[in-house]
Image (tube, helix red, strand yellow):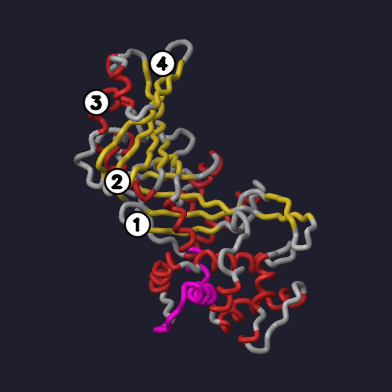
Amino acid sequence: MAESFKLKRFTNVAVLKRLDQKLLLKFLKPFRKFLVAQRGMVWPKRPEDLDHEVLREVLMSPDSNTPDALLDALYFVDSMADENFHDRILEECQEAGVDFGPALMSPEDLALRVWLKDPNILERVHAEQYRSQPKKFESFFATGSKRPDPKFPPSAVRLALEADLNAWFEFRNRGRGARIFPFPKNDAFWFLVRHGQRIKREGTVEADGEAGRVFYRPEKFDVLIYYADTGELAVCAETVGDQKAYCKLLGKHLFGSERFFEFEAPVAKYTLQPLIDAGRDALACGDVEGIERIRLVELHIEHCGPQKDVEVRRADEVFGALDAQHRDLASEADIRLIKAKFNVTFSGKRERTVSIDPPTTASFDREADNEVIHEWLTKRGFIVRAAHANLEVA
């Protein structure tokens, strides 16, 4: 379920009126008994007789008796009934073999029709938007020399994986209902995992002015990216336990071994040594298409003495600040760089930040920038190639 149940469109009478009324009633029909018996809605004899004011009140004030299936249906249809998602939904429909013919449909009518035909399409498009949110990834590598290139998982494999994930999350009081959304790409295979978080309880003010409470389970999206060319699984998840569970279960269901990915002693992926060896030259990006400029804006320096002192430098340009103090990292003894943050200016003057925390952690403002950032990190030596150079494509 959504983090909180707030409909943007279906609590607006004007929107309800402009919907295809037959379609709207068909959408609500599975919940007719609940709407009539428990919420006092009068089911119309003709679609044009639907009381939109009453329906609005029902939809904007769900209670503890409201069926979860109705809440899910309303949440996804309301979220996806947007002009910005219209074309993407049609593309998914085409790929799924769903054809509505030449009928002209508003974004709201399209969302209703798609939900009635195949809810998975809306859920998939909804999940897709989470790929552009800031994420912190931990990298785990295949334990052997073979790294199969995964095919789109059959339904039986996906359902088995979801069943194991449900057992994992349910035991940790985060409920069932985990869903896997695979997204194959040219350079990687993505898996978005939607699951619940622990139940939340909040106080509310009811329509009659009385105090009430609402219970809900926020939704969470984790992101898993498998790179067949390096045997790497990049995991964006909240806890170390979740990261290990994903390594174990993806290895089990996609590659036939729970030990396919090494998670007990992760192999290093990143190093910050180029900042010491090359200095400012490590920020060069002229040979990477799509990047105009890179600045080092934060650097964590560990002085390897008995106190293990950590110095944190933040500046518009850290190398400039060090120059002003006549400091040269290459000439400083017994230091280790443990974290760096870069400001990256992309073509079109878009600025984003990337953080590297060796040996296995990277954080991106937008994972969509990962490919070009990965190219720059590789060319400048921030990615350790030797760690997985012996892998072979199966």
Q: Which residue is tagged 4?
A: 303
- Work out how far the residue at label 3 is from the one at label 2, CA to CA, in angstroms: 26 Å
The answer to whether the residue labelled 4 contacts the one labelled 1, judged by CB atoms less than 8 Å apart, is no
- Work out how far the residue at label 3 is from the one at label 1, CA to CA, in angstroms: 34 Å
Amino acid type shown at disc 1: Lys
Give coordinates of residue 175: x percent, y percent. Answer: 65, 53
- Work out how far the residue at label 4 is from the one at label 1, CA to CA, in angstroms: 42 Å
Q: Which residue is tagged 3?
A: 278
Q: Quadrant of residue 317?
A: top left
Give coordinates of residue 217: x percent, y percent. Answer: 65, 54
Q: How many marks?
A: 4
Callout 3: SS: loop
Give coordinates of residue 111: x percent, y percent. Answer: 50, 72
The answer to whether the residue labelled 2 contacts the one labelled 4, judged by CB atoms less than 8 Å apart, is no
Callout 4: SS: strand
Residue 24 in view in this figure: yes
Span of residues in magenta: 101-124
Choose the circle earlier in sequence order: 3 or 2.
Answer: 3
Choose the circle earlier in sequence order: 4 or 1.
Answer: 1
> In the rendered structure, does residue 78 fall within the stretch colored magenta?
no
Decide if residue 241 is on the left or right side of residue 345: right
Q: Main secondary structure of the magenta part?
A: helix
Choose the circle earlier in sequence order: 3 or 1.
Answer: 1
